[in-house]
Image (spheres, rainbow, N blue to C red):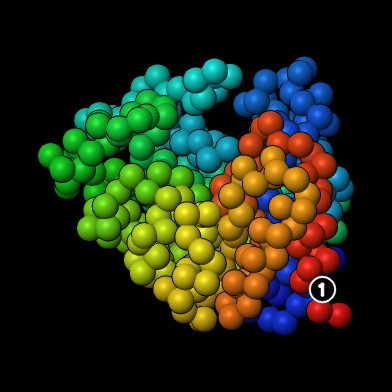
């Protein structure tokens, strides 16, 4: 197996900088679109053979150095009692949002092997077929809480912040419940054989630093503590570049970076004791190949003092992205960073 990604996670010397792309198994690939034309998203997530096929597609097409399990961050949320629909136009819709204490008590304890067996079976298939490491993942507690409280995506997160500020004890109880769910869910993925995990905190950036410290960080720390030393742990807090001094306190082995900060500035803030992942603006992939290559060269140069560097985008690849540009980006990372 090509273990370059895992070496970079651990801060070990590598022959080149490994690369993978968030949402690399997705809508920008015609091969994925062909499958999605005959099956809905949630059914795809719950059909191991097809989920495994979709996971492998970008490894074969882009030649990335790691695969990420094809699934969704809301899968464990559905398993504990949330009624979810994935709408093509509106995104996820939750029909029974958590707005009071009674709703928390209705949530079940997750039993991953029984509640999400399709995830475990997909991992099992991928372990047999992949020649690169497999990344498992979950949403971070705060991000999952926003979906569960708001009933889906939100612009201002009013219901979430009302709960935080008006009933902080209630919010804490809710967050502890979600954290327990995430730990159980990730433990099952690790037991099944994923090589690393990523914690996606997609909505961390809606919080001020003081609120991030109070309402989000400690729960991520609990998750990281549960798995520290077992597999590499990546924590990606989107739109949180101004809070890297707090984000690094998560204890994660690798900090994912969005594109809102220069790589050199990020490493200066984080220090050279933690590996980093990122951080090309996904929209750069709409540019000419020489621009893509130039921007990647700058990121690689900026990351030279990091403990370890994994190239990635600063967020998920956009559906309209030309496949040729994604291929060119991965090729550029490998060529420009080749140290053999």
Q: Is residue 302 visible?
A: yes
**Quarter assignment of residue 31:** top right
Residue at x 47% of width, y 60% of height: 261
180 to the left or right of 24: left
Quarter in which the C terminus is drawn = bottom right
The N terminus appears in which quarter of the rendering?
Answer: bottom right
User: How many numbered marks does the figure carry?
Assistant: 1
Q: Is residue 244 left or right of residue 228?
A: left
Which residue is under mark 1? 338
Q: Give above or below for 27 relative to 249.
A: above
Which of the two residues, 148 or 186, is positioned nearer the viewer here?
A: 148
* Residue 136 visible in the current orientation: no
Q: Is residue 297 left or right of residue 208?
A: right
Q: Quadrant of residue 33?
A: top right
Q: Position of residue 225 (x, y in %)?
A: 44, 68
Q: Is 327 placed above or below 297 here?
A: above
Instruction: State the residue lying farthest toward the left.
Output: 166
Residue 335 position within the rendered picture, expressed as x and y whole percent measured from the top left: 83, 66
User: Crowding near pointer 1: few (<14 within 10 Å), some, many (20+)?
Assistant: few
The residue positioned 72% from the left and 48% from the top of the image is: 123
Q: Position of residue 76 (x, y in %)?
A: 51, 39
Tell me the residue at 40%/55% (across/down).
Answer: 240
In the rendered image, the vertical position of residue 145 relative to residue 188, given as above or below:
above
In the displayed structure image, the side of residue 193 where residue 314 appears, left or right: left
Secondary element type, mark 1: loop
The one nearer the camera, 5 or 219, is 5
Residue in the picture at 51% in, 24% down: 91
């Amino acid at each position: 197996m090509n273990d370059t990604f895992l070496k970079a996670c651990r801060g070990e010397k590598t022959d080149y900088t490994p690369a993978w792309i968030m949402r690399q198994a997705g809508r920008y690939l015609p091969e994925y679109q062909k499958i999605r034309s005959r099956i809905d998203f949630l059914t795809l997530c719950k059909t191991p053979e097809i989920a495994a096929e979709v996971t492998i597609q970008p490894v074969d097409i882009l030649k990335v150095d790691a695969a990420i399990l094809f699934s969704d961050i809301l899968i464990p949320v559905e398993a504990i009692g949330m009624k979810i629909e994935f709408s093509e136009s509106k995104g996820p819709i939750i029909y029974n949002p958590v707005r009071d204490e009674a709703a928390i008590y209705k949530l079940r304890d997750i039993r991953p092997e029984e509640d999400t067996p399709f995830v475990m079976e997909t991992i099992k298939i991928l372990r047999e077929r992949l020649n690169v490491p497999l990344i498992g993942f979950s949403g971070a507690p705060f991000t999952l809480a926003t979906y569960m409280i708001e009933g889906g995506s939100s612009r201002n997160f009013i219901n979430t912040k009302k709960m935080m500020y008006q009933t902080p004890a209630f919010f804490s109880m809710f967050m502890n419940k979600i954290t327990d769910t995430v730990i159980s869910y990730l433990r099952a993925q690790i037991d099944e054989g994923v090589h690393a995990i990523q914690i996606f905190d997609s909505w961390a950036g809606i919080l001020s630093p003081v609120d991030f410290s109070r309402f989000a960080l400690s729960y991520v720390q609990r998750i990281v503590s549960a798995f520290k030393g077992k597999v590499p742990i990546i924590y990606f807090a989107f739109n949180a570049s101004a809070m890297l001094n707090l984000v690094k306190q998560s204890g994660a082995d690798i900090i994912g970076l969005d594109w809102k900060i220069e790589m050199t500035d990020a490493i200066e803030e984080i220090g050279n004791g933690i590996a980093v992942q990122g951080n090309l603006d996904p929209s750069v992939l709409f540019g000419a190949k020489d621009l893509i290559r130039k921007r990647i060269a700058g990121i690689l140069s900026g990351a030279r003092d990091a403990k370890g560097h994994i190239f990635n985008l600063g967020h998920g690849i956009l559906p309209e992205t030309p496949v040729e540009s994604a291929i060119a980006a991965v090729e550029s990372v490998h060529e420009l960073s080749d140290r053999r």
